[in-house]
């Protein structure tokens, strides 16, 4: 196949700012533009100016008349458009189908490929005005080019005909490429616009003229030397100046609320600049810490919660935000992992954590991997605002509350942790896969938070044992701290699931705590293993049988969760073991346990 497109009949689908300009450029090189689609008045006017005498046709007619189809529609529309045209049989064998979306390679054109068309992706790295001015700017313009190797020369030749410079980009790099361009170009416009708005608020009549030499020099320096050319208060470690900037910006927001986005942007970019200057060793760690302390008192737009310095609580929703904040700390960190709906049991974990580390992170994430078929994922209480408020009162430094799409961006993860036999007994027997899901998210959160200490409640004893085993087996550098069960005044173990109980069910549920307490007392009195179990069973037998349906009552090794009788068939008593119980109370599954010990055996040791 020739590497030169030749003289082709070109059809343009979506004759917007990009499409009309590129079609006009192709027409100037001798190609015939056989048709263009466009519904809006603005588009039709653009076709009339840039593509005179080109007929305006329906999309299907444009495609069917063309040897080269140029698809210049919005990114989110492209996939459905191609699939729809393929279903209509509009594409033809050997036809060149070209899109200009930066986000996609040729994968999005798969339906056209299946019809025999040749898919090409070219993306001009330029902002278009949709006027003839753009035609001269095509000269030497970089185009990201993606195509199958046999037809890559066709795509490159097409870009050369447009006057551009082809930059070959692999399919898998397109999203990252487009993110870089959008971040650099689109956000630069937002940033410049904000600076102009602030100057206008300061009384400057021609903000653009004032900014032009400064921003031009800054952009030129950044493109030539990157961060080496960075200047300003952050690069100097001048936290006093940054504090004065924030105060001034807060003042203009009070006078003009439409500027509320400016302080948030200033803080976000200043934080990023602190991290980059620190990484480049242009400022010291103490200087970076002073700057970050000044930058902390802002509002987090993702949550509308106040973000305070020092003892305040910041809420972040993304992995990137978590990593950025975590990298600013050089002190030990303790993490408390929760699914929200916080109660005193969770808060006790937080309080103990604060005694063990100067920084505390609490994660709030309802992990779908821990819920089986028919379980209460959708019904699980979600009370983020209230949770953050109580965590603020407890002095938590950071709350990581990601959406499911942030934790599992591709849906259910392909690679997960497996709990093995320890996860198949007791709770695992009733809830298959629950502990695999728990270990997967705990492992991920330990990695993301880089915690030195992780807090877990004794109430979830099997979870605690499995986390300890995972940390040991995987050599994860974290210390696991167990915190005793927190109970209601009447003895019921605190749990988020208690909220599901009505008055009668809650009263009936007390039989669980009474049962494990009876077993623990029997052990303390020196009873045998069988007698300990019998003491607990007698209490459990007193249950309201209409409301309480036991799942298990076992005395187990607290490290392996193996039933003591199976682990020691000789019948000898342990010095210490775990008495565990589970039951459904109404429709709600509850668990409880007690650490039991035999004083005589302990003395003998």
Image: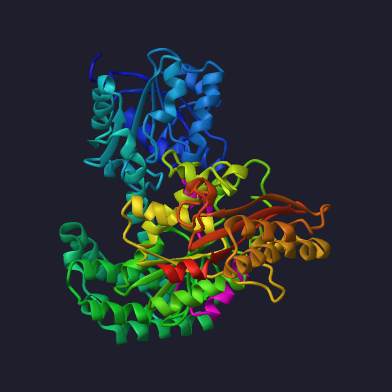
Q: Is 64 placed above or below 241 here? A: above
Q: Residue at x 41, y 44 (%)?
A: 130
Point out the image quarter for the N terminus.
top left
- Asked if one can make out residue 495 in the rendered structure from this viewpoint, the answer is no
Q: Residue at x 70, y 56 (%)?
A: 537
Q: Work out whether residue 585 or residue 378 is closer to the camera in this orientation and state it.
A: 585
The reply to whether the magenta stretch includes residue 384 is yes
Q: Residue at x 68, y 43 (%)?
A: 374
- Asked if one can make out residue 14 in the rendered structure from this viewpoint, the answer is yes
Q: Is 49 placed above or below 128 here? A: above
Task: From the top left corner, tell me how far across and down residue 320 is, in percent.
Answer: 38, 59
Q: Residue at x 43, y 80 (%)?
A: 355
* Span colored in magenta: 383-409
Q: Looking at the image, how many numbered discs can be counted on the residues?
A: 0
Q: Is residue 500 left or right of residue 145?
A: right
Task: From the top left corner, tell me how far across and down residue 343 is, in percent.
Answer: 62, 70
Q: Quadrant of residue 547?
A: bottom right
Q: Work out whether residue 404 or residue 209 is closer to the camera in this orientation and state it.
A: 404
Task: From the top left corner, tell me how far across and down residue 404 is, in percent.
Answer: 53, 51
Task: From the top left corner, tell me how far across and down residue 447 is, in percent.
Answer: 36, 56
The reply to whether the magenta stretch includes residue 17 is no
Q: Is residue 336 left or right of residue 508?
A: left
Q: Is 205 placed above or below 453 here? A: below
Q: Work out whether residue 287 or residue 508 is closer to the camera in this orientation and state it.
A: 508
Q: Work out whether residue 56 or residue 422 is closer to the camera in this orientation and state it.
A: 422
Q: Is 587 placed above or below 14 here? A: below
Point out the image quarter for the C terminus.
bottom left
């Amino acid at each position: 196949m020739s590497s030169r497109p030749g003289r082709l009949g070109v059809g343009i689908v979506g004759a917007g700012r990009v499409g009309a300009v590129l079609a006009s450029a192709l027409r100037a090189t001798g190609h015939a533009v056989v048709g263009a689609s466009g519904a809006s008045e603005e588009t039709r006017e653009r076709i009339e100016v840039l593509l005179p005498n080109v007929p305006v046709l329906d999309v299907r007619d444009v495609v069917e008349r063309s040897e080269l189809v140029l698809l210049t529609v919005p990114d989110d529309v492209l996939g459905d458009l191609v699939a729809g045209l393929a279903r209509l049989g509009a594409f033809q064998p050997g036809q060149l189908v070209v899109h200009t979306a930066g986000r996609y390679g040729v994968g999005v054109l798969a339906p056209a490929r299946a019809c025999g068309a040749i898919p090409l992706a070219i993306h001009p790295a330029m902002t278009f005005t949709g006027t003839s001015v753009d035609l001269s700017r095509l000269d030497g313009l970089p185009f990201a080019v993606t195509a199958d190797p046999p037809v890559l020369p066709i795509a490159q030749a097409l870009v050369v005909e447009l006057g551009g410079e082809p930059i070959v980009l692999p399919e898998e790099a397109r999203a990252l490429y487009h993110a870089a361009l959008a971040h650099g170009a689109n956000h630069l416009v937002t940033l410049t616009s904000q600076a102009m708005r602030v100057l206008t608020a300061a009384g400057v009549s021609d903000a653009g003229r004032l900014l032009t030499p400064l921003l031009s020099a800054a952009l030129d320096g950044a493109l030539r030397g990157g961060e080496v050319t960075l200047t300003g208060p952050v690069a100097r470690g001048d936290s006093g100046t940054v504090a004065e900037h924030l105060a001034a910006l807060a003042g203009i927001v009070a006078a003009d609320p439409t500027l509320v986005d400016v302080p948030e942007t200033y803080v976000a970019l200043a934080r990023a600049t602190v991290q980059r200057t620190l990484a480049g060793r242009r400022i010291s760690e103490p200087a970076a810490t002073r700057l970050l302390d000044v930058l902390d008192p802002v509002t987090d737009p993702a949550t509308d919660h106040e973000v305070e310095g020092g003892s305040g609580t910041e809420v972040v929703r993304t992995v990137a935000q978590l990593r950025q904040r975590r990298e600013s700390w050089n002190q030990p960190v303790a993490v408390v992992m929760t699914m929200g709906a916080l109660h005193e049991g969770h808060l006790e974990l937080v309080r103990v954590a604060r005694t063990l580390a100067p920084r505390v992170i609490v994660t709030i994430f309802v992990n779908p991997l821990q819920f089986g078929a028919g379980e209460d994922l959708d019904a699980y209480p979600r009370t983020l605002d209230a949770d953050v408020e109580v965590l603020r009162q407890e002095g938590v430094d950071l709350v990581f509350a990601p959406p499911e799409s942030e934790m599992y961006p591709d849906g259910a993860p392909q690679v997960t942790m497996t709990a093995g036999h320890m996860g198949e007994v007791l709770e695992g027997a009733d809830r298959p896969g629950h502990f695999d899901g728990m270990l997967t998210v705990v492992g991920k959160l330990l990695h993301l938070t880089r915690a030195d200490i992780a807090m877990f409640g004794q109430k979830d004893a099997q979870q605690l044992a499995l986390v300890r085993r995972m940390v040991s087996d995987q050599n994860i550098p974290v210390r696991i701290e167990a915190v005793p069960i927190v109970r209601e005044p009447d003895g019921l173990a605190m749990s988020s699931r208690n909220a599901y109980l009505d008055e009668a069910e809650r009263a009936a549920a007390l039989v669980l705590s009474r049962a494990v307490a009876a077993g623990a007392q029997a052990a303390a009195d020196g009873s045998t293993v069988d007698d300990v179990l019998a003491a607990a069973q007698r209490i459990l037998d007193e249950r309201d049988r209409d409301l309480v349906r036991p799942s298990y009552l076992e005395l187990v090794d607290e490290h392996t969760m193996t039933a003591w009788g199976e682990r020691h068939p000789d019948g000898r008593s342990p010095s210490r073991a775990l008495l565990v119980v589970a039951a459904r109370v109404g429709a709600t599954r509850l668990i409880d346990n007690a650490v039991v010990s035999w004083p005589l055996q302990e003395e003998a040791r």
